Image: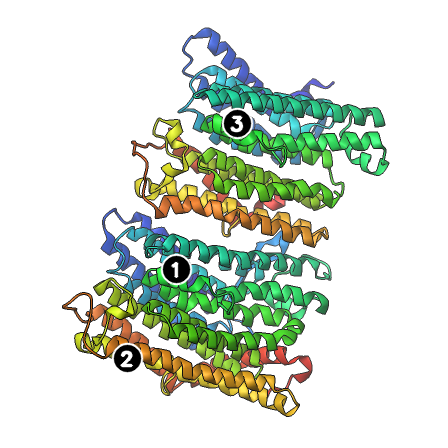
Amino acid sequence: MSDAALLNLVLWLPVIGIGALPLVPRGRDGLVRALTLAAVTLELVLAAWLVVRFDGAVAGLQAETRLGWIRAWGVEYRIGLDGLNVLLVALTTFLGPLVVAGAFTAVQRDVKLFYGMLLFIQFAMLGTLLAQDLFLFYVFWEAMLIPMFLIIGIWGGERRIYATLKFVLYTAFGSILMLAALIYVVYTLPWSGGAPSFAFEYLYRHPPPAAAQTWLFAAFALSFAIKVPIVPLHTWLPDAHVEAPTAGSVILAGVLLKMGTYGFMKLGIPMFPAAARQLSPALMALGVISVIYGACLALVQTDIKKIIAYSSISHLGYVILGLASASLIGIQGAMIQMVSHGLVAGGLFLMIGMIYERCHTRDLAAYGGLARLLPTYSVFFMLLTLAAVGLPTTSGFTGEFMVLLGAFDAAWPQFQLGHAAPLVLSACAVLGVVLGAWYMLWFAQRFLFGAPRAPHQPLVDLGSRERAILVAIVLAVFALGLYPQPWLRKTELAARQYQAVLLGASAETSR
Amino acid sequence: MNLGLALTAMLPEHLLLLGIVALLVLEIASPDPRGAFAVALAATVAAAGAALWLHASGFAGMPFPGHYTVGPAISLAKFVLLGLAVPVLLLSRGEFREARYYELLLGSLYGACLMPASVSFLTLFLGLELLSLPVYVLVVLAFRRPESAEAALKYLVLGGTATATFLFGASLLYGATGSLSITTFASAFWLANPLALTGAALLVAALFLKAAVVPLHAWAPDAYEAASVPVTAYMATIVKAAVLLAALRIFGYAPVAPLVALLPLLSMVWGNVAAIRQSSFRRMIAYSSIAHAGYLYFAFLGGGPGRYQAVMFYLAAYGVMTLLAFVALPASGDDGVDDRLDSLKGLFHRRPAAALAIAAAMLSLAGLPPLPGFVAKFLIFRNVLEAGHAQWAVLGLVASYLGLYFYLRVIQYMFMQERTTELRAERARPLAWAAAALCVVPAIVIAVFPGWLLDRL
């Protein structure tokens, strides 16, 4: 089978799974779980093969499929792997089986619908990443809303309906403005005859006039910024995260939030380079504000899920900082940080789900000294905490360090020219690292150490299913921390192209 | 007049007429006409088939010069109207057995078929009246509460007002131009004759009233709530579609001043906002249809052939999905209970297939991809932007965003809450499966291969 056919199979496997689910007889929940796990595991294997074969030295799309879809409008079904999406495709397919397996015991109600929705969102997320056509991208982007709406709203906590409506209404507002901008971009471009084209490749080569770019970029950026989320558009996130079931939180933190940063990287900035260059300092500032603000809020939370939720805002602030820094190291760091945050926050949410299944409370005050009660659990929790803090050898270190290095790298020449602001911002971002260590370690200290205390005793330590999930995550965290080289090589060319856009065509030579 | 031409060109209408005659004979022949439903269904399916055949064979002709014309596009419009009528008929099976119901329905359909084919105000008026008069009766036919009569009367009075306004507008145009041709409407704008302009404005008002555009919408929620489920479905889809098709004929390709879009825009906003407060399913759908009338008239901002394409596509997508919602709605025998939105709570646990179908319908009406409603909405706003009305398109999109909340609330009720009201045994409506299939299959085709339909428009 050719690579292109394999990539299509990776994308459409969840849909095949959804098609098979209604055939499972009523009451056979075990079969539903096994079927879903089989689908996402097969997907992971195929995607891993494609990602390994992905050649970072080749520019452009690999494993590309290009078919006419709505010919009258020039809309194509066009998917492919490139340096920007390859890491996130790996992350999405990697988290798939972990999310599915993680929900085996937690979800006992409407099992078929639940796994159907998990497969649906997997499909929509992969489609968003792989799409190389703006219309196709938008369809997948919006399609992510529906399954998440149901996942939070049906299997969530007490205030789930409020949380899920807030999530959807926030996100959809951004999308509607993006839709307006999208139509404007495509239909007001001057055409050299023939039908308009929605292909990214075409849109990159024909940016709209500079005067229109600012508004168009703002519309796209608003949509992406809500998804990330960037402070002050973040207020939906704590509610959605806290009320979502574990699987929903893991998908949300693991992949969905990255769609926002990926959107900036893939669409917002390359499609409107002039506006992006002009607004990148503001974006950088917002990134740093998110880092600090998220960390400060995480510091004062008493709900364990909220701590991780706010830490996500802080960690994604680094990604924005890296993407706006226009230095190669910073951009590559942002890409690594996206994957690292997906693994670490995903893992932490899974672990919070595990303790919640045992004790049914998320109140930090109810816990203490879990290291004695649940030794294996505590070891994994500590490892992930250290990765979140950014301890060297973990993926968190690679990502944050490269982003900060890149930010200083870009800020120093500016400082020599007399602009102190970027340097101050970079310094503030370093402060975020300190705050990050503070809230995470303080959290771990209260949670794991001290006098043993838990709402339900005796507690059963992790089972083999749970251990297998966590081992996979921890291995990935260390792999990315100790040896990021292969990933950096796969993304370098794409990062260079992205950097060239941000620096402007005149500064083609990258540092 | 060429008799052969008139026979072929009006074949769908003739088949409907044949059905009506057969029903009348049946009613006289046997006091308990059991076959009424079958006869009506056969006539409608045959008429739809005839329309499709006329479309596919590219038949064009003018059996009544200056009044009535047929072309492939018109035949396709008739096919859409008649095709939407089939699920409505299937839905009627459980509620109505008497022949007079089906006679009235077929009569109304006959009027609907005349409307897209009219080229003179005379034919158009004939079509409009033939479409509306039976519906006034159909609303009271489901007489269950005293309010039904009140709502039907309100509908009758406002419908009469629309008729009078239409006639007045047409006569003013006739006075100004000396012609009954519908092209005089478009010429009124460049003639700048105050008489003609007043006439054109009155015509627009009549068309807005018939399609329930704010502020001429007040009859719709009452009429929808009072009528039975199939009649509401008929009013929300086919009556609305026929009126819009007539508007398309009248407006032609003439560019429209953005001011005309102001009321449709208000309609979108008000329909979407007022729907939030409804506790009756049919009232909610009424406000939804007010908002959708807004979208449809909004599409007139786009010019040229794109306008026709956008409106037709939207009517098809909106029609099948609205019908799907009605078809999937379970029945417990007590219409008052079934109509309450509260009764939908926990529906997924009782009837998963029905809940999924209604959810798909709601998401499509909200315009979310990958459902057909998205492509339809995209098409409308694309045309408006392409015509250079960027600010209007943004306003329209934001107005459409307002609708998301009440559509999601229906899904929230069905999937996320448990039933609080008394539980009665619910059944699927008779023949609901067949009707649902007739909605779902076209919906999938429209959503997955929109190009296929676009090429035919």
**Does dot 3 land on a helix, a strand or a loop?**
helix
The residue under the point 55% across, 17% down is B18
Question: How far, Cα to Cα, is label 3 from label 1?
Answer: 47 Å
Q: Nearer the viewer, residue A321 or A5?
A: A321
Q: Amino acid at mark 2?
A: Gln
Q: Which residue is mark 3?
A: B223
Q: How many residues crowd around disc 2 within 10 Å: few (fewer than 14), some, or many (20 or more)?
A: some
Q: Which residue is mark 1?
A: A13
Query: In the visual, does A497 lie left or right of A399?
Result: right
The residue under the point 59% across, 52% down is B398
Regarding residue A46, the answer to whether it shows in the image is no
- The subunit letter for the residue under badge 3 reads B
Tell me if label 1 and label 2 are in contact, CB under 8 Å.
Answer: no
Q: Which residue is mark 2?
A: A445
Quarter of the figure with residue B94: top left
Q: Amino acid at mark 3?
A: Ala
